[in-house]
Amino acid sequence: PGTSSCIEDCDAGTYQVASSCTACTAGTYSSSVGAVSQSTCLSCPFSSSSPSGSTSLDACVCLPGYTASQNDVACAECPTGTYKASNGTLACSECPLHTSSVA
């Protein structure tokens, strides 16, 4: 049997499931347009995550407790005596006086 209809290509950050587009899950991204498999959604690097539907590696940001390394390619653990409470590329902050953290 022939094809009786056409379906619109899915945007980057999504992939085809039946006749609709599904967003890549949080912690993954895809720059592919017209993707037909979840396997096109690539995982963010270790200790980073991204919102669902992300379209590029740039959407992956360091998790709390990690900060961007000097080359901004990977996330590094905050050293002992420092912390970072939110996602992003901000530097780790010094612990307040009379407090500490364990790396």
Image (tube, rainbow, N blue to C red):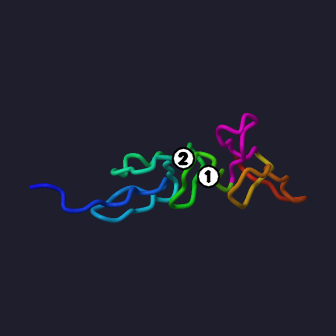
Query: Label 1 near label 2: C-beta < 8 Å?
Result: yes
Residue labelled with disc 1? 59
Q: Nearer the viewer, residue 15 or 5?
A: 5
Please state the horizontal and vertical placement of residue 66, each as a whole percent of the image: 69, 49
Taking the image as shown, residue 73 lies to the left or right of residue 23, namely right
Q: Amino acid at mark 1?
A: Ala
Q: Residue at left 47%, top 56%?
A: 11
Name the quadrant of the N terminus: bottom left
Please state the horizontal and vertical placement of residue 75, each as a whole percent of the image: 66, 43
Q: Amino acid at mark 2?
A: Cys
Residue placed farthest to the bottom in the image? 20
Q: Residue at left 34%, top 65%?
A: 20
Count residues near mark 1 (Cα–Cα under 10 Å), then give few for <14, some for 14-19, many for 20+.
some
Q: Return the disc, 2 or 1, that comes first in the chain's sequence.
A: 2
Residue 72 is inside the magenta segment: yes
Mark 2 element type: loop
Residue labelled with disc 2? 44
Mark nearest the camera among 2 and 1 is 1
**Magenta residues, as a range?**
65-79
